[in-house]
Image (spheres, rainbow, N blue to C red):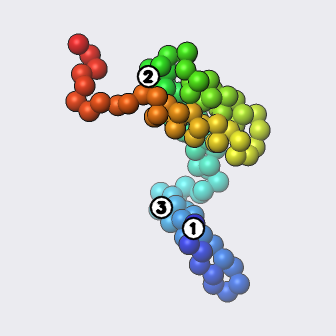
Amino acid sequence: MPLSVCSGGACTSIYISTVTSILSSFSLPLTLVVPILNYLGFALQLVGLASIYSANKWRSLAFWLYVAGMAVMAIFEGWVGCIFIIAAVVLNAKTNKFVYGKKLFK
């Protein structure tokens, strides 16, 4: 839960205040950076999709849950897509055990 600070009847989140103050030191308003964060989030989702694909290719249920979650998040507002992606990551972690020290390239 974010920590809220109230002063003079106006309350603000400490996290947003911190992000805003860091951005303002570079003369960037928060409203200018928010659209860029959407593209950054989409790029990170593609990295996650590539990771699941590299583990099981397209045959796994985790891959298709992740794709469905990304599609739902792109079309609708809400938490349904996040739930799909979290379920895909948990399912992938249960079916594919990572072995430390295993050589990826032989």
Q: Residue at x 29, y 30 (%)?
A: 99
At label 3, the amino acid type is Ile
Residue 55's tag is 2
**Residue at the spot 49% in from the left edge and 26% down from the top edge:** 52
Q: Which mark is residue 97?
A: none
The one nearer the camera, 31 or 86, is 86
Question: How many angstroms separate mark 1 from mark 3 (CA)?
Answer: 17 Å
Picture quadrant of residue 77: top right
- Image mark for residue 22: 3
Question: On residue 2, which mark appears?
Answer: 1
Quarter of the view holding residue 43: top right
* Residue type, numbered disc 1: Pro
Q: Residue furthest bottom?
A: 8
* Residue 28, placed above or below residue 5: above
**Is 15 left, or right, of 80 in this rendering?**
left
Query: Which residue is at a point 60% across and 74% down the rendered structure image?
Result: 4
Q: Secondary structure at mark 1?
A: loop
For label 2, the crowd category at 10 Å Cα-Cα, with few meaning under 14, some 14 to 19 and many 20 or more, is some
From what the image shows, is residue 24 above or below residue 41?
A: below
Residue 66, position in %: x, y? 60, 30
Labels 2 and 1: the sequence-earlier one: 1
